[in-house]
């Protein structure tokens, strides 16, 4: 019932429409027209104004033809750079770009799959419960669309986001993340004439970072120093360094401990250079903010059981998986919508080598279609 050629055409149309984060309006209008024609009740919320973009989140509600609890299906509309003027190439069953841009399979493979599934439902008058399609903006720049989504438009309390690779897996666990912003204030001075009058903020930062364990700390915990900015010129003792860092863990206690350890490393480096809270220099400013909160779906939750039953009906299996990444699903979770993440087959996302096999997109579409069928038949 999934029409492979139609799915391919839909996908090509989507990737040809630029939709860099904050510039999703043309793509949104294109998708909205398709969903309106499929009989959905569509609305674009006010998230665009709140995030400084040209478009809000698109929510499309399908009434369905069977009584069942509403189900959410989600994808994000935005893509990363370089993502303008994508020229898709289809070769040996696989889509890629011409090598100068990303392909945008992240996440337009998902958008195309969801459109195909709802088209197949309508074309074949398949049993289907109420469905809320949620297409977000600005996922790639900090889940901003989801964070500002008007959840009064969403009826569902569970569902699926299509934003991963493995078509035979469902992500049921994602970590919590803290964002750690550090500013080290040193003191400027002429590097040649009076270096003893200065305090080198770069040297303080180096001392702190050198003492930190970074990367994968254990099976469920990671941390990273992602950005470091500082200094003015080769002949000036640098007065300021700004550092953006993060820590993630599936375990809240471990996350708190790692976050504390990172902050402490900067505090003791400042102290080692004779600084402290009351000193002029070096001096530290730190802010720790919760980026997103962990998700965990129990094995016996309807989201997992539905996907398992659908896979079994198709003669396939589906494995519950954990991820180290954060996604819109984390935000939906915080809003009480239990969201499993499914894979569309996309590979090498965020690179100019990004690609996706059409056969994998078909596999994902078949799974989602079967999930809707099982859901409508009231098994769950
Ligand atoms: Zn994505």
Image (cartoon, rainbow, N blue to C red):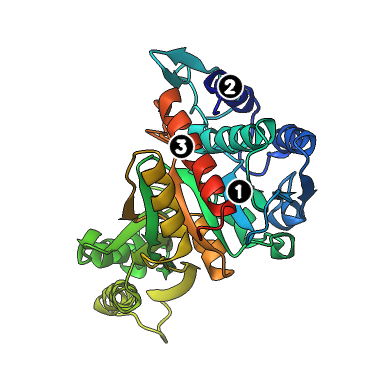
* Numbered circle sitting on residue 138: 1
Residue 271 horizontal/vertical position (percent): 28, 80
Residue 21 horizontal/vertical position (percent): 61, 42
User: Label 3 belongs to which residue?
Assistant: 364
Q: In this view, does 217 lie to the left or right of 230?
A: left
Residue at mark 1 to residue at mark 2: CA–CA distance? 21 Å
Residue occupying image coordinates x 67% and y 58%: 67
Q: Spot the residue most to the top.
A: 91
Residue 238 horizontal/vertical position (percent): 39, 59
Q: In this view, does 370 lie above or below 148?
A: above
Q: Quadrant of the N terminus?
A: top right
Which is more N-terminal, label 2 or label 1?
A: 2
Tag 1, which secondary structure? Answer: loop
**Crowd tier of the residue under label 3, counting other residues whose Cα lies within 10 Å: few below 14, some 14–19, many 20 or above:** many
User: Label 2 belongs to which residue?
Assistant: 12
Residue occupying image coordinates x 61% and y 41%: 77
Which is more N-terminal, label 3 or label 1?
A: 1
Residue 286 sits in quarter: bottom left
Residue occupying image coordinates x 31% and y 71%: 262
Residue 228 sits in quarter: bottom left
């Amino acid at each position: 019932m999934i029409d492979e050629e139609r799915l391919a055409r839909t996908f090509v149309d989507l990737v040809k429409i630029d939709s860099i984060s904050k510039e999703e309006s043309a793509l949104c209008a294109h998708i909205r027209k398709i969903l309106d024609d499929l009989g959905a009740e569509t609305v674009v919320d006010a998230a665009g104004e709140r995030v400084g973009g040209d478009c809000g989140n698109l929510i499309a509600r399908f009434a369905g033809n069977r009584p069942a609890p509403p189900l959410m299906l989600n994808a994000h509309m935005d893509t990363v750079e370089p993502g303008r003027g994508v020229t898709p190439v289809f070769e040996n069953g696989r889509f890629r770009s011409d090598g100068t841009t990303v392909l945008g399979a992240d996440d337009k493979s998902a958008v195309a799959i969801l459109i195909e599934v709802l088209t197949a439902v309508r074309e074949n008058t398949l049993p289907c419960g109420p469905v809320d399609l949620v297409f977000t903006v600005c996922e790639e720049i900090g889940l901003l669309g989801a964070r500002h989504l008007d959840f009064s438009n969403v009826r569902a309390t569970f569902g699926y986001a299509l934003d991963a690779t493995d078509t035979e897996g469902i992500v049921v666990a994602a970590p919590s993340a803290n964002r750690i912003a550090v500013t080290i204030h040193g003191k400027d001075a002429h590097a040649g004439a009076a270096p003893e009058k200065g305090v080198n903020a770069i040297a303080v930062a180096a001392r702190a970072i050198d003492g930190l364990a970074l990367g994968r700390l254990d099976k469920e915990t990671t941390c990273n120093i992602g950005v470091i900015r500082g200094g003015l010129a080769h002949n000036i003792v640098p007065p300021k360094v700004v550092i953006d860092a993060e820590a993630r863990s599936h375990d809240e206690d471990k996350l708190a401990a790692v976050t504390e350890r990172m902050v402490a490393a900067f505090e003791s480096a400042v102290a080692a250079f004779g600084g402290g809270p009351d000193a002029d220099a070096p001096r530290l400013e730190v802010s720790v903010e919760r980026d997103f909160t962990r998700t965990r779906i129990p094995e016996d939750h309807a989201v997992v059981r539905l996907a398992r039953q659908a896979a079994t009906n198709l003669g396939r299996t589906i494995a519950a998986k954990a991820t180290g990444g954060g996604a819109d699903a984390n935000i939906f979770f915080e809003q009480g919508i239990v969201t499993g993440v499914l894979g569309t087959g996309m590979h090498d996302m965020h690179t100019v080598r990004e690609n996706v096999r059409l056969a994998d997109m078909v596999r994902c579409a078949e799974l989602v279609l079967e999930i809707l069928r099982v859901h409508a038949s009231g098994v769950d």
